[in-house]
Image (cartoon, helix red, strand yellow):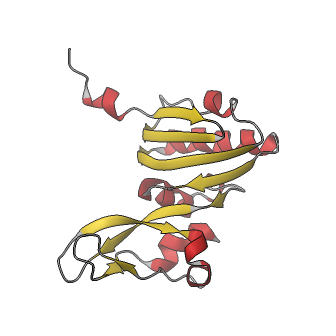
């Protein structure tokens, strides 16, 4: 029996202590609030595996954040994927009151041509990010200095 591409991409959620990990596509078939009810005290939401989110998915995501905030949970976003960053830059409510621990951003290496999303840990670059500037990061493939491959003011707007 084979698994269809749609089934493989469907959002998958798991909880380990206070960490909710979400991967796959967040869309009209995704129920995040049932997973949010299981979190207590604080909530770390790992979004590194989110590959897509549509408008209905954004509504479900915002509902989850509202639910956790209403319960008084401190929300930390970890490994925020590029699709989630893009939604957070367009929809203010998509970040809510959450703090961002780390996020992926597009970089391009001018030396070897490697293009990939690199993880930025906010605590390692507070002044740079506060100034709206992406940090200098090495290319994973060749070690040369990679270049931020997006408009910084637009892409990093979700942090403010």
* Image point (77%, 45%), residue name: 73
Q: Is residue 59 left or right of residue 49?
A: right
Q: How far across and how far down the image is residue 74, in percent?
A: 75, 50
Image quadrant holding the C terminus, namely bottom right
Say which quarter of the image contains residue 158. bottom right
In-front residue for pair 108/152: 108
Residue at x 34%, y 75% (from the top left corner):
149
Residue 16 screen position, x and y as percent: 59, 35
Q: Is residue 119 left or right of residue 132?
A: left
Residue in the picture at 34% in, 35% down: 9
Quadrant housing the N terminus? top left
Give the x, y percent position of residue 42: 73, 45
Q: Residue furthest top?
A: 1
Residue 33, x across and y down, in percent: 64, 32
Callout count: 0
In the rendered image, the vertical position of residue 128 relative to residue 53, given as above or below: below
Is the residue 74 above or below the residue 32 in the image?
Answer: below
Whether 148 is drawn above or below 14: the answer is below
Residue placed at 78% from the left, 41% from the top? 41
Residue 71 quadrant: top right
């Amino acid at each position: 029996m084979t698994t269809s591409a749609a089934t493989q991409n469907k959002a998958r959620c798991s909880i380990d202590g206070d960490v909710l990990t979400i991967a796959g596509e967040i869309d009209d078939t995704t129920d995040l609030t049932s997973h949010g009810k299981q979190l207590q005290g604080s909530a770390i939401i790992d979004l590194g595996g989110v590959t897509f989110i549509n408008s209905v998915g954004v509504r479900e995501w915002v509902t989850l954040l509202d639910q956790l905030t209403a319960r008084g949970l401190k929300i930390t976003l970890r490994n925020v994927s590029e699709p989630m960053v893009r939604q957070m830059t367009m929809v203010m409510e998509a970040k809510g009151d959450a703090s961002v621990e780390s996020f992926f951003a597009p970089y391009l290496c001018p030396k070897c041509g490697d293009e990939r999303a690199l993880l930025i840990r906010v605590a390692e670059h507070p002044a740079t990010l506060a100034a709206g500037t992406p940090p200098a990061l090495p290319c994973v493939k060749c070690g040369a200095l990679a270049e931020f491959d997006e408009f910084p003011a637009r892409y990093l707007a979700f942090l403010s």
